[in-house]
Image: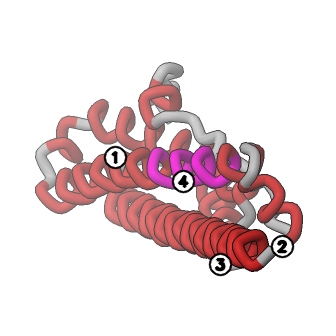
Amino acid sequence: MVIGLILAGVGVVLVGVYAMATYNRFINLRNGIESSFNQINVALKKRLDLIGEVVDSTKGIMKFEKGTLTEITKLRGQAAGNLTPELAAKLSNATGRIAGAISVQVEAYPKLSSNENVKQLVDSLQEVEQQIAQLRYTYNNTVQEFNTSREMFPSSIIAGMFGFSKNSYLQMKEPQESLEKRPDTSI
């Protein structure tokens, strides 16, 4: 009888330790997801700022559609708010498309291509594109790990007990996709 109580006590302790470790793992993954998402938001805002700088630097030489300038202003307003993964993806796709169009237009204007300031801005824009892709990869990997752990037994019991819900992946287009359709440079 005493041995049975000891074994039961050891079993309860082991289950408690497992539950605590699993809970802490979910917290760690959730915080990693939030951190990755916040880094993506910073990079998206940086991309918008760079686009604005390129537009300002090239305004006198290239003619931008009024709609493009209006869209940049609108996107900056959206980026200033609380972003969800879905809104961040839409913002990223829109800014990626604009960034691709600007890069193509800069290439089409020899005077701009040789301008060191514009060249540095476009290079910075391409670096931010790569950074966003890397951050999205990290975010989506962490989401996958979290969601998989949440669905696997026995950690699914802990996830259910503490209300850990499924996270969404970021569905953003790669920068190259935004460059597939080259815009008309006669604008």
Per the image, is 142 magenta? yes
Residue at (75% x, 45% y) in the render: 153
- Between tags 1 and 3, which lies in front? 1
Pinpoint residue 3: horizontal percent, then vertical percent. Answer: 70, 72
Residue type at mark 4?
Thr
First-in-chain label (1 vs 3): 3
The local secondary structure at tag 4 comes to: helix
Q: Dot 3, how many residues are within 10 Å of its Cα: few (below 14), some (14-19), or many (20+)?
A: few
Label 2: how many residues lie within 10 Å, few (<14), some (14-19) or many (20+)?
A: few
Predominant secondary structure in magenta? Answer: helix
Q: Nearer the viewer, mark 1 or mark 4?
A: 4
What's the CA distance linking mark 3 and mark 4? 25 Å
Q: Position of residue 101 (x, y in %)?
A: 47, 37
Q: Amino acid at mark 3?
A: Ala
Disc 1 secondary structure class: helix
The quarter of the picture where the N terminus appears is bottom right
At horizontal 64% and vertical 70% (from top left) the residue drawn is: 14
Region rendered in magenta: 137-147
